[in-house]
Amino acid sequence: MPYKILYFCVDSFVNFCYEIANLSKLFSGGTKMTKQELVNRIAKNNNWGLTKKATGEVIDAVFTTIRKAVKKERRFSYPGFGTWTVRTRKARNGRNPQTGQTIRIKASKTVGFRPAKDFKKKL
């Protein structure tokens, strides 16, 4: 996949996220977006003549690359947007909500996202 197309799709995705952040101010409770809505929006606004199918494949490639980078490097940063990192949760005690019984929750890993300052300013 040509680098310029991948860069354009990532950049379009970031700009689209900024737009959603601005639109969410209009709605109480925010908005939820589906993958198909993202594909449609980027396909509609791209200058490369990408079809919806090709746009979807590029978006999948972007997220696959992010996922692999986070898994391998434990961190992925996109300037102006934010940083994904692996976070480790310690083992802890919890409670079964049905029975009220105390249970032990195992240690686990999760992915955290920290938005960049520029992104937070546009919210």
Image (tube, rainbow, N blue to C red):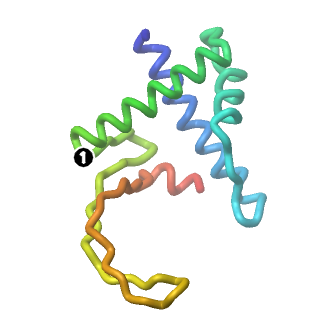
- 83 vs 45: above or below: below
Position of residue 108 measured from the top left corner of the image (x, y, whole percent): 29, 62
Quadrant placement of the C terminus = bottom right
Left or right for 96, reference 122: left
Q: Residue at x 51, y 88 (%)?
A: 99
Figure disc tally? 1
Describe the element under mark 1 as helix, strand or loop. loop
* Residue that badge 1 annotates: 74
Q: Residue 113 is drawn in which quadrant?
A: bottom left
Position of residue 93 measured from the top left corner of the image (x, y, whole percent): 32, 83
Q: Nearer the viewer, residue 58 or 7?
A: 58
Dot 1: within a 10 Å radius of its alpha carbon, few (fewer than 14), some, or many (20 or more) residues? some
Q: Nearer the viewer, residue 37 or 18?
A: 37
Q: Residue 79 is drawn in which quadrant?
A: top left
Left or right for 81, reference 65: right
Q: Nearer the viewer, residue 46 or 97?
A: 97
- 52 vs 88: above or below: above
Q: Amino acid at mark 1?
A: Arg
